[in-house]
Each structure stands twice: as C-alpha cells, then as structure tokens.
C-alpha cells in the first residue's frame, strides 16, 4: 500500500528551453465604475505573496497554441470588467497604512513563449519539477517594481502542439476556491459563453468588528517578533524530497481503519473523510519523525490546515466571494498521544480543528489581525490542492491534462496534490532533512501495512 517516488524521474527535464516571444499588458475591455480602491481584509493582508500555477493541455486540432493564446487574451480583457481589482496595483493607504488595491485599471501581464520540447518529453507532470517555474512570467520588465501586475499569464507552446498556461497571482486576490471560479469564468468567456459565476468582490464582508473582540486564545496564530518579518521563513537545511502516492484503495483502507478503531468514540463516519484520514496519517509520521536529542514523546505537535469559512459564517458568505475566505485550523497533541492513540483518535483531533471554526471563532480570528501583526504558527501546515478541481475546468480545447502549483521544498509545509490517473488518489509531497525523512518513510509504510 502506498508508493514512494524517491528520486526525480529519469526523464525529468531540468531546462525546458523556453524562448519568450512577447510580453504585453491586457486592460479591461471597457471602463469600470468601481471606487478608486478596494479594501483588503486581515486575511488578505497577511497573504501578500505570489501563487504560481501551471495548467498543461494536450494538442487540439482546432486550437493550436497561438489560437488559444489569442482567445485567452481576449477573454482576460473581458474578465477584467467583473474582476476589475485584478487590473489594479497594491498600495498602502496613506491615511490608514493598510494594504489595499488601487483599482486603477493598470492591467495584467500576458506573455507568449515556446519550448523546444514536446509535452511528453517533460515527463511526469505530477512530480514537482523546479523547471515548471520557467512556464511562469514572474514580472513585466518594462514596469517598475511597485507597478507590477497582480496577475500575469504565460502561454507556452510545445513542439507537439500542446501548451501550458502558467499563471502567477498575488495571494491577496484569490484563495484556492475563488481562483477555481475565476478559471471557470475564464473558460466560459473563452468559449464566448456568459460567466459561470458572478463574482462577489465585497471584501468588507470580512472586515474586523469595531471595536475588535478577540474571544478565543488562537493557539494557531503567533505575533511577529520582527517589525518586518518575511511571510515565509527560509531554511538553509539540506532537505530530501519525496512524493508519497496514496491510491483510492489506500484511502479507503485508511477510512476502514479509522472506523474499526472508532467504536465507542465520538468520531462519526461523516467525519472520516479522505482529507481527514490522510492528514491524520501524515501528522502521525511527521510528528514522530522529529529529530531532537530530547525526549520526543513529551513534545506537543501542532498541525495546521486551511478551512473554508464561507458556509460557517452567520449569515454565510457568498460562495462566489473572490477574496481569501480561509482561516487556519489546528490540532494539537503530545507525541506520546500521537504514538499510542488509535487511528480514530487522530482523525477525531483533526476534525476538531474544523469543528472549532464557528462564526464567532472566525470573527475572533479576523479581529485578532486588527490588533496584532502575526501569522499562522505550528509545527507544519498541510496545504491541500487535492479537491480544488483546477483540472476539471472545461476550456474550448478541453480540460487540462494536469494542473498544479509550482512548489518549493519546505520542511514546514506538506502538500496534497491530485493524482493524474486516480481521481480519488492523492500525492503527498514531503520535504525533510535526510534523517527525519528516513523515519517518516518507515512510519508511513508501517502505518499502511
């Protein structure tokens, strides 16, 4: 059960031999009536960093790359009317000092490029290849640093007639769910259809209360101890990188394992989901692989993961809300409990994180960000791209062969990716120092045996 990709596939290409033909700006197709600036919530403000995704498409007789690129360019111009903030620029409000978006219609970036390879030459698309970063246009060189677009799209053609659409956006613009809706709308407009979903751009729906009221301890948050800290701390440690692939059968077995040990416990079958059992397994392996000279069993391990708060607020937030409507849930336990507890207990602890996220808890966390400067704090974060459905978007030239973020090795972030062949399977991407990785791998296999 469960397989591991230990090393980069032998066919993994390190240099995609990209030639950029053109970089331009796309502007809204018509004038918009939005106010000059867009308020950003406390959730948005702390996520001021780029997110890069790549969407691979096989060749299509009716839509060669240059035709697809022109259709995307036209569609993006149309989309910048309902998504007018995307054509704006990040600014600091001179009166309040808050980060906001100046809705000045300055445009988004659009690049056209080509690779000397065919798409099949690229190899395993699931395996995170650093070379995928070459499919992203990270900046528009003709613009100053403080005038860079919030979104840049690059269309890269391959020799076979397939192409990749690489998109970089500032995380302040979208969370994963709203980005999926953006892609659905992009596909619809490209096909000359109406918007699939009308976006809700009112970020004031997640404004802090006045006065702010923090009613929970929020163990998942920590104040910055530096006046200008990095959003993500880098590490100089040498890290091993592995992909742990769980099939749909593996996940079904984990669910059965949780149910079998849940008799007499408080965890219901409804909470024994694929995400919860895989997260519980990963937590077990990560916590117990910690390399420390002191006794590991007394150490408290804190797991973090994102929860969509749209349906949890009172009244519920529109599902079409474009901003960041996710907050960090947490689970905590000593390593002794993680080591000795039945699997159902670990699953229960994971589910309690999401269960804790009520309307009042979410509002308290948002208010916390009005009082303190801080960021989610824990041993590691599970970042799940598993069920976002980027590869289910139906463009005129079909669905992507695969969609994925461009990732970098970080020991405090474990990523869940969908599998290219098994719709219900998942790929777990782990980066750890060699000694810890060896322990993680042993625990992973032992737990699945």
Image (cartoon, grey):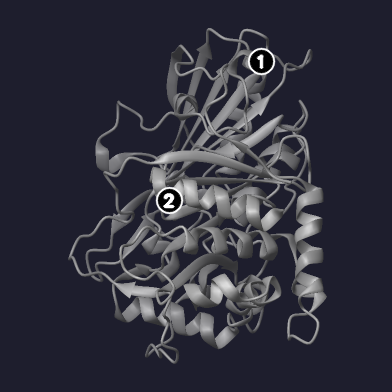
Residue 448 horizontal/vertical position (percent)? 70, 54
Q: Which residue is found at the position 65% from the left and 49% from the top? A: 180
Residue bearing mark 2: 436
Query: Which one is in front, 367 or 146?
Result: 367
Q: Quadrant of residue 190?
A: top right
Give the distance between the C-alpha atoms of the residues marked 1 and 2, in whole angstroms: 34 Å
- For the point 76% across and 17% down, the residue is 60
Viewer-closest of 391 and 74: 391
Q: Is residue 39 visible?
A: no
Question: In the figure, 76 relative to 2: above or below?
Answer: above
Position in image of residue 303 (x %, y %): 50, 68
For the point 74% across and 80% down, the residue is: 267
Sequence order check: which comes first, mark 1 or mark 2?
1
Q: Is residue 247 left or right of residue 234?
A: right
Q: Is residue 294 visible?
A: yes
Q: Secondary structure at mark 1?
A: helix
Label 2 crowd (10 A; few <14 / some 14-19 / many >=20) = many
**Is 265 or 114 nearer to us in this picture?**
265
- Rendered image quadrant of residue 155: top right
Give the percent coordinates (x, y) of residue 150: 42, 44
Question: In screen coordinates, is 232 left or right of 407?
Answer: left
Binning the other alpha carbons within 10 Å of mark 1 as few (below 14), some (14 to 19) or many (20 upward) gives some
Question: Which of labels 1 and 2 is toward the front?
Answer: 2
The image shows residue 399, relative to residue 368, as above or below, that is: above
Which mark, residue 120? Answer: 1
Residue at 55 percent of width and 65 percent of height: 306
* Left or right relative to 98: residue 12: right
Residue 2 % position (x, y): 70, 45
Asked whether the beta carbons under mark 1 and mark 2 sit within 8 Å of each other, the answer is no
């Amino acid at each position: 059960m469960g397989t591991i990709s230990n090393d980069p596939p032998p066919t993994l290409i390190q240099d995609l031999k990209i030639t950029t033909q053109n970089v331009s700006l796309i502007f809204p197709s018509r004038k918009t009536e939005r106010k000059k600036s867009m308020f950003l919530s406390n959730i948005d403000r702390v996520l001021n960093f780029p997110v890069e995704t790549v969407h691979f498409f096989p060749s299509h007789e009716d839509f060669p790359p240059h035709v697809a690129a022109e259709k995307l360019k036209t569609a993006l111009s149309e989309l910048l009317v309902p998504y007018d903030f995307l054509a704006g620029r990040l600014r600091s409000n001179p009166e309040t000092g808050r980060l906001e978006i100046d809705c000045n219609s300055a445009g988004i970036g659009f690049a056209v490029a080509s690779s000397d390879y065919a798409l099949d030459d690229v190899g395993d698309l699931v395996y995170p290849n650093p070379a995928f970063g070459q499919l992203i246009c990270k900046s528009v060189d003709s613009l100053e640093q403080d005038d860079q677009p919030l979104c840049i799209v690059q269309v890269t053609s391959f020799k076979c007639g397939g192409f990749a659409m690489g998109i970089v956006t500032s995380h302040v613009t979208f969370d994963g769910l709203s980005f999926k809706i953006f892609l659905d709308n992009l596909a619809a407009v490209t096909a000359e259809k109406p918007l699939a979903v009308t976006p809700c751009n009112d970020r004031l729906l997640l404004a802090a209360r006045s006065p702010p009221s923090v009613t929970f301890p929020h163990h998942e948050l920590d104040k910055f101890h530096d006046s200008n800290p990095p959003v993500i701390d880098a590490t100089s440690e040498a890290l091993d990188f592995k992909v742990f692939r769980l099939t749909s059968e593996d996940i079904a077995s984990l669910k059965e394992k949780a149910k079998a040990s849940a008799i007499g416990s408080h965890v219901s079958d409804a909470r024994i989901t694929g995400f919860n059992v895989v997260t519980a397994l990963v937590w077990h392996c990560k916590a117990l692989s910690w390399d420390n000279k002191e006794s590991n069993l007394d150490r408290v391990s804190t797991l973090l993961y994102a929860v969509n708060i749209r349906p949890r607020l009172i009244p519920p937030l529109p599902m079409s809300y474009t901003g960041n409507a996710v907050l960090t849930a947490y689970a905590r336990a000593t390593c002794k409990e993680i080591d000795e507890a039945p699997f159902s207990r670990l699953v229960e602890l994971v589910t309690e994180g999401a269960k804790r996220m009520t309307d009042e808890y979410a509002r308290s966390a948002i208010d916390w960000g009005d009082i303190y400067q801080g960021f989610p704090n824990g041993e590691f974060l599970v970042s799940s791209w598993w069920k976002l459905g980027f590869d289910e978007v139906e463009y005129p030239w079909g669905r992507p062969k695969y969609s994925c973020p461009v990732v970098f090795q970080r020991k405090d972030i474990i990523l869940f990716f969908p599998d290219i062949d098994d719709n219900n399977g998942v790929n777990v991407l782990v980066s750890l120092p060699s000694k810890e990785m060896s322990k993680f791998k042993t625990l992973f296999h032992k737990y699945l045996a």
